[in-house]
Amino acid sequence: MNVTELMAAVRPAHPPYRSARSTDMRLRVLHGVPLARPLSRMRETAEIVRQAASGEKVSYSGREFQIPLPGGEGKPMRLAMRAEHDIPIYLATLSPKMLHLTGEIADGWLGTGFVPEGAKKAYFDHLDAGLVASGRSGADFDICQGAEVAFAEDEDALRAMVAGRKKELAFSLGGMGSATTNFYNNAYSRQGWAEVRERLQAGDRDGAAGLVTDEMVLATTLIGTEDMVRERLRVWSGAGVGIVRFYPAGETLDARLTTLGRAIDLVRETEGEAARLRPVERR
């Protein structure tokens, strides 16, 4: 884990609950497109982006996309500015087939709902199968994981932090989808956390939050004392995370920047303890 490859998002760490649902519902509501054939859509999108970033004229004929669209006077065009460096493509994916595709065609994975202790079966086995299919290894691929980071100065502060995040985690575990399709819940279920969804679908948010343990909150965040966050970063690095995205907590911009600075200092402390790990067979 290298601080020079750290991505930071300085925004409030607690976004409001989303009104639109994920997967097919979200695509139809916010984007006006169906979920049909997501694998081919993702593959073709990546190919088009790579072509555009190369500086060449964009001309593409696929199952999902035709550029230029046939039947008009349009001709292939190139972007006004060519990238000076190769632009890596990272995909934020959750389902086994989409994870396989990510390992096959992408330069990295943007982890969501990542718990290192259950990541091999839930995520890495699928990513690694895609890498093997493309003739690559873990050394050719970035694991980029993000989480909220917050520092508690004592046990009382830590208990308050953890308690305040249980409803949010419950929503992520069970509310990010419809009653029939929920990729977030499926991913968490592969890590052993399947009980929360039924409570949320029944409208019982308090009951769902009651099923979230302190350990679940701590496993999915970088919340704790400085020693706890430092140790969690070591666990991430040992699991294969090479790039970390911090979402610093704080009520003001200054507070979030202070939290971010402390987190970066911990990365600097830990980066020399172990080489960056990207094994094909991860823990």
Image (tube, rainbow, N blue to C red):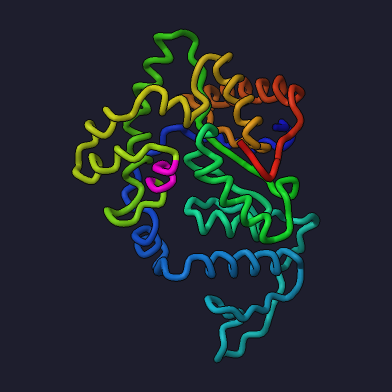
Q: Main secondary structure of the magenta part?
A: helix
On screen, residue 179 versus residue 24, left or right, reads left
Residue at (71% x, 46% y) in the render: 138
158 w.r.t. 13: above or below? above
Q: Is residue 279 magenta?
A: no
283 w.r.t. 182: above or below? above
In the rendered picture of this protein, how many numbered marks are placed on residues? 0
Q: Is residue 187 magenta?
A: yes
**Picture quarter containing residue 135?**
bottom right
Query: Is the C terminus in the top left, top right, bottom left or bottom right quadrant?
Result: top right
Residue 250, position in %: x, y? Answer: 48, 24
Residue 233, position in %: x, y? Answer: 61, 26
On screen, residue 156 versus residue 262, left or right, reads left
On screen, residue 101 versus residue 141, left or right, reads left
Residue at (47% x, 28% y) in the render: 219
| Magenta residue span | 185-190
- The residue closer to the viewer here, 28 or 131, is 131
**Picture quarter containing residue 7?**
top right
